[in-house]
Image (cartoon, rainbow, N blue to C red):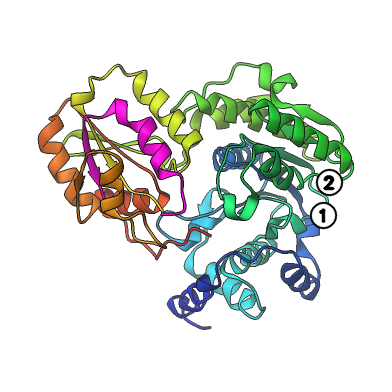
């Protein structure tokens, strides 16, 4: 067998191709594999913000109901194997190597290779059901080759990835709602009205049945107590509840109790996650668009901290709406530090400083070292703006070994 590091090197060699949306390459790979994805019940989740949290809750609920569950998400924070999980556990090296060796025999992009590897791994592990998080958009995302999911959902929609998905909520909603399939339930999460109406329209046009709003389903109206931080996680729990409720037509061992337990115990690192540096709280949040930054600011504001006790460590990719994000973040932190995350085209430090007063730092670790001396033991250090930045920071704080991160 080819060593895993060599296989991963070949997978990462496909990353420079970037985003190449389309279903043909993945379709040909699945034809060659004789469509193993047809052998289990699938749940499919799209959305701008929250889809990872919903996927994590749904997969944990299914596991607690006694099912063998596959989970495919992206991107990873530390190790590539985080993208492909069986019963919540990332693939071990042997299983990952087996899946990647076969997936690499097809002409695929980086993301498509990861997806096909997940399909192979789920098949080899004899999963009974699988939860798939869309990578980008939905209509032309590799995951949309799943022909007959037992239930689908669209979480909150906001402006992001405009150069690929469009610059209006309605256009983005069309792309994401296009995971709808004839006769398959579609759950619509809380979102701005223009997006909600467009998702409903597209889902109905594509024959989804029923098309339901998350908070109108019985399980979503039951008591839910999210472990994940942030008021927006109540919305995500509601979507997960509705998705699981409609999945019970095919997965009838799943009960409301399993769902409630999953909501109350799930973990999802890097999303309003509290860690510590020398006893000072460091709040990590992968928010990288204005809508997600709004949720972060609302969470911090509920703690009623004085701005002089809060330090902001911020870095973003150049193609994100970082000027708007900084405007939203300005009131919560008097002390600001800017870094350039490793990854494709980060926003340059001089540009960040020209937008909002702050100190340029060589790394997140340097920024946190300085910030900790300023805010003191009762202060708060907020790290946000990019999942790249959160991954780097988390790896440093926890001394977690990491593969290269790719936002695909």
Point out residue 179 in the picture as x, y percentages from the top left corner: 76, 47
Q: Nearer the viewer, residue 130 or 319?
A: 319
- Residue under pointer 2: 181
Q: Are marks 2 and 1 in contact (CB under 8 Å)?
A: yes
- Residue under pointer 1: 147
Q: Toward which corner of the image does residue 168 lie, by quadrant?
A: top right
**Which residue is painted at 69% across and 60% down in the image?**
142
Q: Toward which corner of the image does residue 43 lie, by quadrant?
A: top right
Left or right, 194 with reference to 19: right
Determine which of the numbered discs, if any, sits on residue 44 in the image.
Answer: none
Asked which secondary structure carries label 2, the reply is: loop
> Does the magenta portion include 290?
no
Asked which secondary structure carries label 1, the reply is: loop
Left or right, 137 with reference to 404: right
The CA distance from mark 2 to mark 1 is: 7 Å
Left or right, 9 with reference to 166: left
Q: Nearer the viewer, residue 322 or 310?
A: 322
> Over which residues does the magenta segment extend?
318-339
Point out residue 201 in the picture as x, y percentages from the top left corner: 82, 35
Point out residue 286 in the picture as x, y percentages from the top left corner: 42, 43
**Which residue is painted at 40% across and 38% down in the image?**
325
- Disc 2 crowd rating (10 Å Cα; few below 14, some 14-19, many 20+) is many
Relative to 90, residue 184 above or below: above
> Does the magenta portion include 323?
yes
């Amino acid at each position: 067998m080819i060593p895993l590091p060599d296989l991963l090197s070949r997978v990462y060699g496909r990353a420079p191709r970037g985003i190449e949306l389309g279903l043909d390459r993945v379709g040909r790979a699945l034809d060659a594999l004789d469509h193993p994805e047809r052998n289990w019940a699938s749940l499919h989740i799209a959305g701008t913000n929250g889809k990872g949290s919903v996927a994590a809750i749904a997969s944990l609920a299914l596991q607690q109901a006694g099912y063998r569950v596959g989970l495919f998400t992206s991107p990873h924070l530390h190790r590539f194997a985080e993208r492909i999980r069986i019963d919540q556990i990332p693939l071990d090296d042997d299983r990952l190597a087996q899946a990647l060796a076969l997936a690499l025999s097809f002409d695929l992009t980086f993301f498509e290779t990861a997806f096909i590897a997940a399909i192979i791994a789920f098949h080899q592990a004899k999963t009974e059901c699988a939860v798939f998080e869309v990578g980008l958009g939905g209509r032309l995302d590799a995951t949309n080759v799943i022909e007959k999911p037992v239930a689908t959902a669209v979480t909150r929609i906001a402006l992001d990835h405009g150069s690929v998905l469009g610059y209006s909520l309605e256009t983005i909603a069309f792309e994401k709602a296009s995971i709808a399939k004839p006769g398959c339930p579609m759950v619509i999460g809380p979102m701005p009205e223009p997006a909600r109406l467009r998702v409903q329209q597209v889902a109905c046009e594509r024959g989804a049945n029923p098309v339901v709003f998350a908070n109108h389903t019985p399980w979503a109206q039951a008591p839910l107590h999210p472990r994940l931080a942030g008021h927006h996680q109540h919305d995500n729990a509601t979507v997960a509840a509705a998705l699981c409720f409609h999945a019970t037509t095919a997965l009838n061992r799943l009960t409301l109790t399993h769902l409630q337990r999953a909501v109350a115990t799930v973990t999802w690192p890097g999303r309003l996650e509290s860690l510590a540096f020398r006893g000072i709280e460091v709040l990590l949040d992968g928010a990288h668009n204005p809508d997600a930054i709004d949720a972060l600011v609302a969470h911090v504001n509920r703690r009623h901290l004085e701005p002089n006790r809060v330090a902001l460590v911020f870095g973003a990719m150049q193609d994100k709406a970082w000027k708007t994000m900084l405007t939203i973040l300005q009131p919560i932190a008097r002390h600001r530090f800017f870094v350039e995350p490793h990854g494709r085209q980060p926003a340059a430090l001089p540009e960040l400083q020209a937008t909002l007063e702050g100190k340029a730092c060589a790394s997140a670790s340097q920024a946190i070292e300085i910030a900790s001396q300023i805010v003191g033991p009762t202060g708060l250090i907020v790290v946000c703006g990019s999942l790249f930045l959160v991954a780097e920071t988390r790896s440093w704080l926890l001394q977690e070994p990491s593969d290269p991160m790719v936002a695909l």
